[in-house]
Image: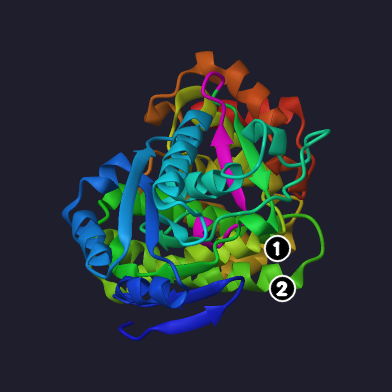
Amino acid sequence: MNTVSNFSFPTPIKFGVGVRHQLAAFFRSEGFTSVLIITDKGLASLPFFKEYVAELGNESLKVSVFDGVHGNPVKSQVMAGVEAYRTQVKESGTNKKIALLGIGGGAALDVTKAIALMAHHPGDIFDYEDEKPGMRPIDQEIPYWVAIPTTAGTGSEVGRSAVVADDQTHVKKVIFSPRLLARAVFADPELTFALPPAVTAATGLDAVTHLIEAYLAKGYHPMADGIALEGLYLAANAIGKAFADGANSAARSDMLMASMMGAVAFQKGLGVVHSCAHALSAVVDMHHGLANGIMLDHALDFNYHALPQKFERLASTVGLTAHTEFLPYIARLKSELKIPQSLKAAGVSEKNLDALVKIALADGCHLSNPVPVTENDFRTIFAKALA
């Protein structure tokens, strides 16, 4: 896919190979003269990133970089980024001509949203935790921010929430508001070409998990269901090709699109897989996409017998003939992508079981699971995944 496509759903999106090179002109057309880039340390060290910073700077933009994102995002990273933004405001004398630019995977983009929130909102970031009793309103100015995704997994570039963990407990908190949505997205599949196979696999299964869980989530939302199924169709046909050949432009494009579709669809809700994955990130600091990938078939088995018609539709979408083939298909996909089949194979110990159950039960994602999940249910799911 070498052409640029334009969408206005759910925010203005420019999609296509090389589209990132249009961003400097876009910033100038919007009246910005200064850009603060938020990214992670690994990405900031890559030649493409340094070249891109120079490219933006050559277009009469003052460019600064905050590269304090690493691992699963935590509050201290956000607040360090807020200070970087305030320093840039102080140096320029105004915040009206400064744009934030999030470049990276879900971690960098979530931190960008959180920085945008806390730039002008008082108090502690966790005062704004979604559905927290007494949560503060998100009603102050939000700086203009643009997203450039470099992985095809979280779809955070089109999401309205930021997931940030407490530095001490590592428990993830969700900050949600439609006002956190990026003002524009420049989705360039070329930036995913150089992803290592292991990252392609983990982020790709993150997208697949979003699509499946959004479709299965309880509630009436045919629009989200339709997006989820089409996204799953794209991902099922592209993920193996992208894993085998990182420079396969068509496969990379389809995975990036499927990732965004998953993030749009899961506005309907997620489920038990994500609660398990969030617990794994908190307890053993496991990459979120890898955690979803490992748990996907183990946790979906909990829903399987209650929803035969929905699993029939999922099976049909990925080219199978019966719903009984879907979970074995997920296991085969994990094997093809070299994802561990169990938590034990990933180095997780049974000594972590109690902590995993406790955090998964407290996580909000399973509240939209189509089947209620109890503490004993989580214990059974994790125990099977550890076997």
Left/right placement of residue 221 relative to residue 125 reads right
Mark nearest the camera among 1 and 2 is 2
Q: What residue is shown with label 1?
A: 310
Left/right placement of residue 276 relative to residue 350 reads right
Q: In the image shown, does 107 or 318 lie closer to the viewer? A: 107
User: Where does residue 183 sit, x and y in percent of width and height?
Assistant: 55, 66
* N-terminal label among 1 and 2: 2
Q: Amino acid at mark 1?
A: Lys
326, above or below 74, in the image: below
* Residue 372 location, quadrant: top right
Q: What residue is shown with label 2?
A: 223
Residue shown at the point (67%, 50%) measured from the top left: 270
User: Where does residue 87 sit, x and y in percent of width and height?
Assistant: 42, 41
User: Where does residue 206 sit, x and y in percent of width and height?
Assistant: 48, 51
User: Where does residue 47 sit, x and y in percent of width and height?
Assistant: 16, 54
Q: In the image shown, does 121 or 360 lie closer to the viewer? A: 121
**Cα–Cα gap, marks 1 and 2:** 15 Å
> Residue extending furthest bottom?
3
Mark 2 lies on a secondary structure that is: helix
Residue shown at the point (56%, 26%) measured from the top left: 166
Residue 162 in the magenta stretch? The answer is yes
Q: Amino acid at mark 2?
A: Met
Cβ atoms under marks 1 and 2 closer than 8 Å:
no
Left/right placement of residue 61 relative to residue 13 reads left
197, above or below 345, in the image: below
- Image: magenta residue range: 156-169
